[in-house]
Image: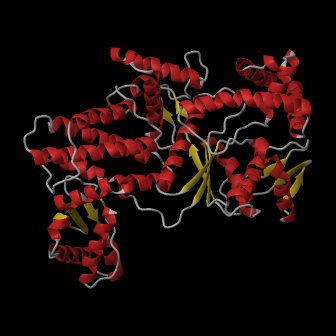
Amino acid sequence: MMIKELETILSEALKRTGYEGSLKVIKSNRPELCDYQCDDAFKLAKAYHCAPMVIGEAIVNELNKFDRFEDYFEKVEFVKPGFINLTLSSTFINRALIRMNNEEKFGYPKPEHVDTYVLDYGGPNIAKPLHVGHMRTAIVGESIKRIINYVGHKTIADVHLGDFGLQIGQVIYGILRDGKKNDEITLDYLEKIYPEMSALCKEDDKIKEECAAITKDLQDGNSTYQDLWKIILEISGNDIKRLYRYLDVSFDLWQGESDVYQYIEPTEKILKEKHLLEDSEGAKIVSVEKDDDVNSVPPLIWQKSNGAYLYGTTDLATIYEREKRFQPDYICYVVDNRQSLHFEQVFRVTKKADISDANLEFLGYGTVNGTDGKPYKTRSGDTPKLDGLFHQVQEIFVSKKEDNKDMSEEDLRKIVNAILKFADLQNSRDRDYIFDINKFSNTIGKTGPYMLYTYLRINKILSVEHVTNSLSMNIYNEVDRNLRLKLLELEHAISDAFQYRMPHYIAEYIYTLADLANSFYQNNHISGLEDEKMKNDWLYVLNLTNKVLKEMLNLIVIEIPTFM
């Protein structure tokens, strides 16, 4: 909103010079010179066949003649060869802060049209214990969902469990082999039998074939296998829900592959009507290669020669179901980067067969690595289970300070979450990152605890002082000005996070704001300050800062403890 206001003023000044066009204002890349800048003189010069300096100086001259100049600017300068540098006035900064403070969501504009987004994230396989790799899709997906909601759109979050694949056949094989009764099937047993059977299938092709046959019979409705599957689903599903509750991750739909089998037939009917299904050595496939492909894209396998269905089948049937039920504008998949080819195949078939009009988005994420740069492992070389990781992070945080031992379990849960989530979300989601528990557990530096500590520190000041709802037009020093300017960048951070589906824009903003707030606190001593106007202004700014911190931390799925 603030940027648009500046752009309107500059565009009107341009019009008064006799030139036509709209001007864009961006944050200055040289903050020591100015706050914002406009570089469009170059573009206009090309259109009007003149030097950028001619247009740039004309705009600056008009701005400096503006009757209400001081309401907006402290200084406007032209810098060769074609830059317009804008330094904002205290009046403009403070008016914008007052609007932020008084308006819902700090004045973030509502969308012209409310779109429906289906978000597919989480996606763990039933019967397999959740490990550190499952954490990333849950955290990133939940944050993207909250950001989309915040800007005013509707979201439908679907965990889309892997509950009908080969791993279920393997576990059922193990249960039957071990002669387990229904009441003997426990979470501990499932966590033991799955890796055992998975390893066995890699060694013994005959057993692998038997497990595949069980999976096929389960999908075809075998009652014995269905009964065992329901037990596995309940036990494993309840544990998955418990872990997601710990992470404060929620879903509107707890569906899985099994729920979309009813949609396979109507989806196949569409593929047949469009003459897209081909036979290939007994299997049914859909070709998706394009003439302009740089790399070959293999066909999507719709059905194996033994009649079994694969992920491609159920993913297409799921898109069919989502279109039928929700008519979404967007369907977004928060999944591992390594699944990009699979989803490229699925998306191409969807559009080729006209299964859905929705925009299909692959929101890939990188891996969580240890300090050695390899996928994160425990000391024994295993991928750590989430329960173990939560416990390990809590132990390390508690060991950092004696007072931490007295914290409640709920506060510790929130801090563990902050450690894990800020470690993840400060990175661009599409990149791998190194997870260092010791580093990310500190209350100083770019860490979750530092953000929480900053909020609680400010909150302590606000709890003992009276905060008024008025702000003067004064700014008292550079540290004060820097914090106020950062508050005004909030809209841009939210817009980038939403547009690119990248929560790290919010995380980066929170960190910089927290750092500036701490600098403000250290340089501007409020306690005992006799100048009441200055004191009220600073309390106002700190109060707004904490309101922003709290709402933005919520967007990256971080809750605030009672104390640290």
Does the image show residue 492?
Answer: no
Task: Residue 496 in the image: state x and y as whole percent.
Answer: 43, 54
Q: In the image, what residue occupies the spot 86% across and 53% down?
A: 265
Q: In the image, what residue occupies the spot 85% across and 30% down?
A: 227
- Judge from the rendering whether residue 342 lies leftward or rightward of residue 383; answer left or right: right
- Judge from the rendering whether residue 139 lies leftward or rightward of residue 359; answer left or right: left
| Quarter of the N terminus within the rendering | bottom left
Residue situated in front as seen by the camera: 414 or 338 = 414
Does the image show residue 114?
Answer: yes
Residue 500 drawn above or below residue 447: below
Based on the displayed image, in which of its 4 quarters is residue 376 positioned? top right
- Judge from the rendering whether residue 203 lies leftward or rightward of residue 496; answer left or right: right
Based on the displayed image, in which of its 4 quarters is residue 397 positioned? top left
Task: Residue 12 in the image: state x and y as whole percent.
Answer: 27, 78
| Quarter of the C terminus within the rendering | top left
Task: Residue 347 in the image: state x and y as whole percent.
Answer: 69, 56
Residue at the extreme bottom: 18
Task: Residue 472 in the image: state x and y as whole percent.
Answer: 16, 55
Residue at the extreme left: 530
Based on the displayed image, in which of its 4 quarters is residue 214 positioned? top right
Q: In the image, what residue occupies the spot 31% across and 62% down?
A: 2
